[in-house]
Amino acid sequence: MLLAILLASTLAQDSILKDSRSADTRGPRTIAVDEVLAAQAHVHIGDRVVISARPTAPGDTVIVAAIVRRSTDPSEVAREDLRVRTHLDQLQTLVGYGDRVDRFAIETRPGTDPQRLIERINDVAFGFKAYRSSDIAVETSRTFQVVSRFHRAIGIITIVASSVFLLCIMVLKVEERRRDIAALRLMGISRSTVVRAIILEAALIAVLGSVLGIVIGWLASLFVNWHYQSLYHTPLAFSIVTTPIVLVAVSLSLALGIAAGIAASLRLVRQPPLALFGR
């Protein structure tokens, strides 16, 4: 099996300058295996495996010392890389790269000016460029930003459609109660009392509808996370229902319900009671 060595881990605490003969006397080296690769290859901690840069090349016998769980990095969701983490000197020998690296990360101390450090690194030599980790995260997450905007547009369309639907329901319900409203008016019930009753009923319907929608959304979120986490082998949460989302949903629903109740009630209370009876 060809194991693609994609990342040099900081698990290696040994110095690169150690003599290779002393490494041979210690026996097999250790590696850390990605959890997806471990599951697919049926590899467990303590197993001895052979790693090599090419299928036909001679490899090194190593011991699996750890199984690494995947992170919740959105940029790695659609990638199907299987990772093995090795000691740095072992990786250099395995791939024949010598004293070269494709990329490396620098952790700054508190109080360091990141922009000044980036400028100093870029002025050292030609051929490489330093970036902030936040800038890299933004670039690799552009796909998710597009998806987020798409979901926001769908949400706005859904809110507009639901408000129209709620208004239609309230108008139909009030129209069905024309005679009841006329009887209340003839009994001396004021217009404002009738309007408040209809608004209260509309607000109650809106709140009950929002609660039902939150429950359905929560169940749908559980299904989406279960499906895509098993599909991409990642602990990343693809769908979440947060407290701000719930508060916004209930507030919008209540506001739209009250607006629909006002629009539906004013349409009838402005007519004379006898006109509501059809006379």
Image: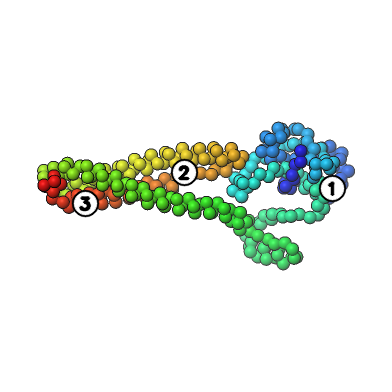
Near mark 3 (Cα within 10 A), the count class, few <14, some 14-19 or many ≥20, is few
Q: CA distance from mark 1 to mark 3?
A: 88 Å
The residue located at (53%, 54%) in the rendering is 146
Residue at the far bottom in the pictured view: 123
Q: Which SS class for mark 3?
A: helix
- Label 3 with label 2: CB-CB less than 8 Å: no
Along the line of sight, which residue is nearer the eye, 110 or 196? 196
3 or 2: tag closer to the N-terminus: 2
Residue 98 as seen in the image, left or right of residue 122: right
For label 1, the SS is: loop
Q: Position of residue 161 (x, y in %)?
A: 37, 49
Q: Identify residue for label 1.
A: 18
Q: Is residue 22 visible?
A: yes
Spatial CA distance of label 3 from label 2 is 38 Å
**For mark 1, does the 10 Å Cα neighbourhood hold few (<14), some (14 to 19), or many (20 or more) residues?**
few
Q: Residue at x 43, y 39 (%)?
A: 216
Residue at (79%, 55%) from the top-left corner?
Answer: 100
Q: CA distance from mark 1 to mark 2?
A: 52 Å
State the image coordinates of residue 22 (x, y, percent, origin top left).
87, 42
Disc 2 designates what residue?
241
Identify the image quadrant of residue 170: top left
* Residue 21 screen position, x and y as percent: 88, 43
Observer able to see residue 14:
no
Of callouts 1 and 3, the N-terminal one: 1
Q: Pointer 3: what residue?
A: 267
Left or right: 214 as drawn, with respect to 71: left
Could you tell me which quadrant the N terminus lies in? Answer: top right
Name of the residue lying farthest toward the right: 21
Kind of residue sitting beneath label 1: Lys
**Contact flag, marks 1 and 3 (Cβ < 8 Å):** no
The disc, 1 or 2, on the residue closer to the chain's N-terminal end is: 1
Position of 231 compared to 3: left or right? left
